[in-house]
Amino acid sequence: MRSRKITAAITEKTGEPFEIEDIELEGPRADEILVRIVAVGICQTDVHVRDRLQPAGLPAVLGHEGAGVVEEAGEAVTSIQPGDRVVLSYDACGTCRFCLSGRASYCEHAMAINFGGARLDGTNALRRAGHQGREIHGHFFGQSSFATYALATERNIVKAPDDLPLELLGPLGCGFQTGAGAVLNSLRVPPKASIAILGTGAVGLAAVMAARLAGANPIIGVDLVPKRLALAAELGATHTIDARKEDVRERIAQITHGAGVDFALEITALPAMLKLAVEILAPCGTVGQIGGGVPGAEAPISMSRLLLGRSVRGIIQGDSIPHVFIPKLIEMYRSGKFPFDRLVRFYDFKDINQAVADAASGDTIKPILRVSSL
């Protein structure tokens, strides 16, 4: 099968900077779609995999918030054609019991298909140029979009409208759909319910905006970065708590008059924060855990508190069906109700390491790399 030379950001070794170099990408198979990447968001999951806080093989091409233009579609592809503008999201097998019941983010093959570094059949379309064709781990989230070109499938491609900036839309495929979906799909937060959002980065701020759309009150944002908390207040948080300066549990008790919150979203992946999330719940309240934590991380949770109807549930991708939920987010953006453009900052592809550093420091909430022009 023919291949093409592409440029990619390589994660070579644990914790090291990304390296831009030319590699080779195999052409699309019958069920695959070749996408020229216009822009790609940087998600904390990319950084966690680079730093081996989440399992995946290295060296690798990461990136899973791609947006671009279809260059070629395999003969078995029916819903996508060359020239389509598209957003890429997580992949799933499409045939297991979870996929068939509309819960593809919990696909039985989710780890293998998104983090396995290859197709489900074990083959890999990426090879190192000039290194005797040595393979490099690819197909990250079914895309590996830290590159000028990526392969995807109909399962994880969503058509994008022609009248919006394509370079803006990539983060809808993961971070923004995760935060908003956690509120609207997973927890189904009703009007006037109280919610605390522990961590107001890109995912948390998407949750803040969704909570406002749901009519929640109060909406409490908790973080360590004043810039994020200020933006949370502008985007819908009724209260913000700087955890460096205030006791979060005491402040939430004050805000809720001792009742606790109906819902809490734990996004920080810190065990102490999951413990806290349970402690601030009202009876019959629910914690949604988005932050995955390092392998083996455990949080001590009071069993007696859970007896009062409290519950904890994990959330992946906001229980979102991308083909359904991403268009909804786009329409909410059009109407001014989901202004996610306020969270982003653009960088040239070659500046990927600066973008990662700015996100880590809190200077940038959602970095987006401009990879190619339309």
Image (cartoon, helix red, strand yellow):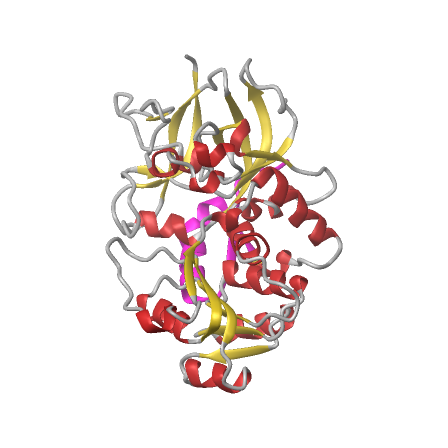
Image quarter for residue 213?
Answer: bottom right
| Residue 232 located within the stretch drawn in magenta | no
- The quarter of the picture where the N terminus appears is top left
| Residue 371 located within the stretch drawn in magenta | yes
| 10 vs 2: above or below | below
Residue at image coords 70%, 53%: 332
Q: Is 138 on the left or on the right of 284, as rendered?
A: left
Q: Nearer the viewer, residue 357 or 187?
A: 187
Q: Count the marks: how many?
A: 0
Q: Position of residue 55 (x, y in %)?
A: 28, 44
Residue at image coords 38%, 35%: 108
Q: Is 310 on the left or on the right of 344, as rendered?
A: left
Q: Position of residue 359 (x, y in %)?
A: 45, 60
Q: Nearer the viewer, residue 153 or 324?
A: 324
Q: Is 313 on the left or on the right of 188, as rendered?
A: left
Q: Nearer the viewer, residue 103 or 15?
A: 103
Image quarter for residue 4?
Answer: top left
Residue at image coords 29%, 41%: 56
| 129 vs 246: above or below | above
| 182 vs 268: above or below | above
Q: Position of residue 27 (x, y in %)?
A: 46, 19
Q: Look at the image and give the residue range highlighted in magenta.
A: 345-374
Q: Position of residue 186 (x, y in %)?
A: 53, 53
Q: Is residue 365 visible?
A: no
- The quarter of the picture where the C terminus appears is top right
Q: Is residue 281 visible?
A: yes
Q: Nearer the viewer, residue 336 or 324?
A: 324
| 116 vs 164: above or below | above
